Image (cartoon, rainbow, N blue to C red):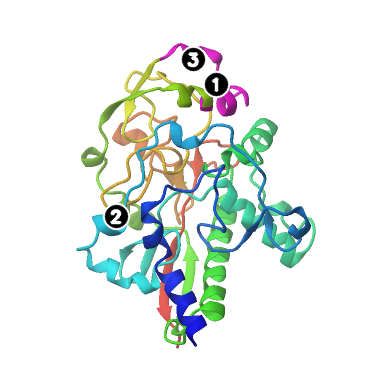
Amino acid sequence: MKYYVLLTLFWLFNSHLLSAQKHPTSEKPGCCGVNTNNLYTYNKEDEDNYLLIYASNRASEQDLFYEGKFDVWEANKDNPLIKQIYLIPTGALPIETGQFLDQTEVTNIDYQEFLFYIKKDSGLYKDKAYQPELENKFRINYFQNPEFYFYPVVGVRHKNAEAYCEWRAQQLNLLLVEKLQYEVRKYIYHGRLPNLEEWKKAAGHPAASISEKTYKLDKKAYEFLDYDIVSNRFAKPYIFEKRSYIGYNKNLKGPSGDEFALEVPAYVYSFEPDSRGFYNLYGNVKEIVQEGYAIGGSFQTPFSADALFEKEEVHAYRTDVGFRCLTEVTRKK
């Protein structure tokens, strides 16, 4: 009994205990999936059972536009929704009683984990229908590149984004059955994309959260740009001439258009989170909602109401369209 209590406490409070640490990076991804707690492996001999993590990163993605660790639990200690902590899925935050939205966009490593388990559980090549649809440059240099593990997965069709959210909830339900006490096992998780109303509720009004900001580029930032961005052909070398970047506190196209033109979005924990701890609901990538289109603006989108809420219905081959999941919890009947 003591063993199960300890596992319960670890899982229930893992996000809180990690609040003093930095977010995961390609260099230090941690033990397991942010959204599932499924174990990774660093040993090639175990790759049939666990997702194999490859060594990276010569320069940390935290060095560019990273605002530091945001302690969501301290910032929201007076929020009654946080009292549901025993039900909050790993990687998510509450937006309503029994409703939890992912703190960040689904990342490349999250989606690779999904594809790994499709192959493991359903057989070789069964993952083919769920693969991101991208040009080779972005498939090889971005999605499959360990340097970009914690960047938004892009090029995913609506139905496959829904499939990921459903699968993620199934993994959380397995965790309830296998590791948690009887009381918590009375509940069940359901995963889906948020609908437009839910997404807007979490995002809040853009005018209240988006402002202009200047970013100064230091030596480590230049190393990151050199090793990970320019070397993978996601920007031209002229960016090294810059000493600062004028943009926003969200990853949107700069006020005059192309001050710092990159062809990929940013590390999912970059830029300022909102007051509840969500990252990049506005900017970075447009996000697919349940209705089938994507909204919210991206790193290619200017800051305007028309651009932020323009409905993007094409997802395949788009490098600025991603998604995050909404997880609902109900009591078993």
Q: Which residue is mark 1?
A: 235
Q: Residue shown at 54%/63% (left/top)?
A: 37
Mark 2 vs mark 1, CA separation in Å: 34 Å
Residue 51 image-quadrant placement: bottom right
Instruction: Report the front residue among 214 and 95.
Output: 214
Q: Main secondary structure of the magenta part?
A: helix
Residue beneath disc 3: 240
Q: Position of residue 202 (x, y in %)?
A: 31, 54
Q: Which residues are magenta?
A: 224-242
Distance Cα–Cα, label 1 vs label 3: 10 Å
Task: Give the residue furthest to the front.
Answer: 2
Q: Residues within 10 Å of mark 2 (few under 14, many from 20)?
A: few
> In what quadrant of the picture does the C terminus appear?
bottom left
What's under tag 3, amino acid-wise?
Phe
Task: Pinpoint residue 313: horizontal percent, then vertical percent.
Answer: 50, 43
Q: CA distance from mark 2 to mark 3?
A: 39 Å
Residue kind at label 1, given as amino acid type: Ala
Q: Nearer the viewer, mark 2 or mark 3?
A: 3
Sequence-wise, which precedes: disc 2 or disc 3?
2
User: Could you tell whether 146 is left or right of 241 in the image?
Assistant: right
Q: Residue at x 36, y 61 (%)?
A: 16
Question: Residue 229 colored magenta?
Answer: yes
- Residue at mark 2: 201
